[in-house]
Amino acid sequence: MALWGWLLLASAAAYAIKLAGYLVPARWLENEHMSRVAGTLTIGLLASLTAMNTFSAGAALALDARLGALLAAALALWLRAPFLLVVVAGALAAALLRLAGIG
Amino acid sequence: MSFSPSPAVKIGLSIAVATGLYGVSFGALGVASGLGVWQTVALSALMFTGGSQFAFIGVVAGGGAGSAAFGAATLLGVRNAVYGMQLNRMLKPRGWRRLLAAQVTIDESAATAAGQLDPGEQRRGFWSAGLGVFVLWNLFTLAGALLGDALGDPRRWGLDGAAVAAFLGLLWPRLRAREPVALAVVCALVTVLAMPRVPPGVPILLAALVAALWGWFSRGPADEGLEPDVDPADFDAAGGSPQERR
């Protein structure tokens, strides 16, 4: 299937999940496992995506300017910078490291 | 102007501006990942749940298949079902309002409503944050996608570094205790160890499996990991918001 197909399918799934929350019986909310898994799944996936975007190079691993971006973003977050500034810090760090010939 | 928004509406609109603005980064990164301008815009309009959108383009940028992008985006959207259940109990929307409410059910609108005690304020907070973020997120996505398209080589501008920063920025507010930090470290390690061994996109699904098992078999706060990227409490008028309008 072409990328457009997966994109539309994923969008339909995202809406179906949201709507499902409004349609399931209220007592399902009492199931503590359900919201626990939704929460840990969110943390695990975001951590995994952070790692993948930092170290992936096709099917191999690489250490390059993106590690500098990760550290710059962590510093910005630690200083309580707003999201957009964090993203800019990451881009700036990666661009400057490359300009200096690293990664 | 004589229009004077209620406290919940003020918070909702402040959230909309703060969240909507970073649609610029999503738009630029979407194009940098290899998606077209219209594919990037379609994700914001149709999928409309930031974490899943970033996941979709993150997998595509990493060389993953469309099916892997679908899997990561869908799993990351599961928490929206929990918000839907909470909001359904809070607002009880009926008919077409329920269908519309579902589309704007995201971290920020759920958190804005949950932060209010009065039922009327919960409703106003939810709709002002949900619709406000929807409008601005889409406008800024388009702006970012056009900007990214004009920039050319994404690596030269450090846009791959921006993607790394964006994911860390989405993760960070959810790491408020030792246990979620441990979970994040384990899932990152699983990903890095799996990457050279399995096809692109699959390591994320393995990490998701580990996280789901962790959540099912461990005990902890039920709302862990369900924090919004932009916290409505930061915009509470009582807290002396810098965004206070006249």
Image: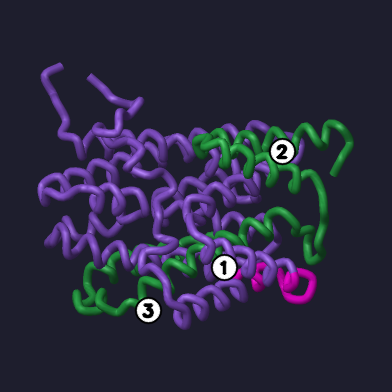
Is B7 on the left-hand or right-hand side of B143?
left
Q: Is residue B45 visible?
A: yes
- Residue A49 position, x and y percent, is 61, 60
Residue marked by disc 2 = B158
Q: Which residues are magenta?
A: B193-204
Label 1 element class: helix
Query: Is the residue B151 above or below the residue B77 in the image?
Result: above
Q: Colour of chain B?
A: purple
Mark 1 crowdedness (10 Å alpha carbons): few <14, some 14-19, many ≥20: many
User: Which residue occupies 41% across, 40% down?
Assistant: B19
- Front residue of B70/B13: it is B13
**Residue at the limit of the structure toward the right, as seen here:** A101
- Residue B220 position, x and y percent, is 42, 71
Residue marked by disc 3 = A33
Residue marked by disc 1 = B183
**Residue at the limit of the structure toward the top, as seen here:** B1
Question: What's the amino acid at mark 3?
Answer: His
Quadrant occupied by the C terminus of chain B: top left
- Residue B135 position, x and y percent, is 34, 39
Magenta includes B150? no
**Do discs 2 and 1 belong to a common subunit?**
yes
- Give the colour scheme shown: by chain
User: Mark 1 belongs to which subunit?
Assistant: B
Mark 3 crowdedness (10 Å alpha carbons): few <14, some 14-19, many ≥20: some
